[in-house]
Amino acid sequence: MNTLSNELREVTAERVVVTKDTLRVELADGRTVEAPLAWYPRLLHGTAKERARWRLIGSGEGIHWPIWTRISALKTFLRPSFGESQRSFKKWLEMRKKKAA
């Protein structure tokens, strides 16, 4: 049995803080983990108000933002990839620019 695998499956978030530079997730077991916001371009390009509109999903196993689908609390820090193609991200940025104009 792989103890690390079991521990990782039990990672759940309780609180999320997004600053202009950092995504910080406070975990149910008392740990706090941080990642650079640059790993998550939609959050990086989002407004402070959009970044603050998060909600926990799956009993804290994931985090959802309206400007972005969702991310796993676990994958947030194990695999720094936002899982979106560059083409899709560029299209999203263009759409935001048109709406702002």
Image: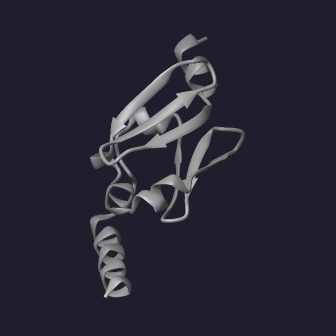
**Residue at the limit of the structure toward the right, as seen here:** 59
| Residue placed most toward the observer, 81 or 93 | 93
Name the image quarter holding the N terminus.
top right
Residue 82, given in percent of the width and then of the height, sits at 38, 51
Whether residue 2 can be seen here: no
The answer to whether 78 is drawn above or below residue 39 in the figure is: above
Residue 7, given in percent of the width and then of the height, sits at 59, 18
**Residue at the limit of the structure toward the front, as seen here:** 49
Q: Residue at x 44, y 39 (%)?
A: 76
Location of residue 65 by image quarter? bottom right
Q: How many marks?
A: 0
Q: Residue at x 57, y 11 (%)?
A: 3
Location of residue 77 by image quarter? top left
Q: Residue at x 51, y 53 (%)?
A: 52
Instruction: Judge left or right: residue 37 versus residue 30.
Output: left
Q: Residue at x 38, y 62 (%)?
A: 46
Residue 47, given in percent of the width and then of the height, sits at 39, 62
| Residue placed most toward the observer, 40 or 96 | 96
The structure's colour scheme is one colour
The answer to whether 78 is drawn above or below residue 52 in the figure is: above
Whether residue 35 can be seen here: yes
The answer to whether 61 is drawn above or below residue 47 in the figure is: above
The answer to whether 67 is drawn above or below residue 82 in the figure is: below
Residue 70, given in percent of the width and then of the height, sits at 54, 54
Name the image quarter holding the C terminus.
bottom left
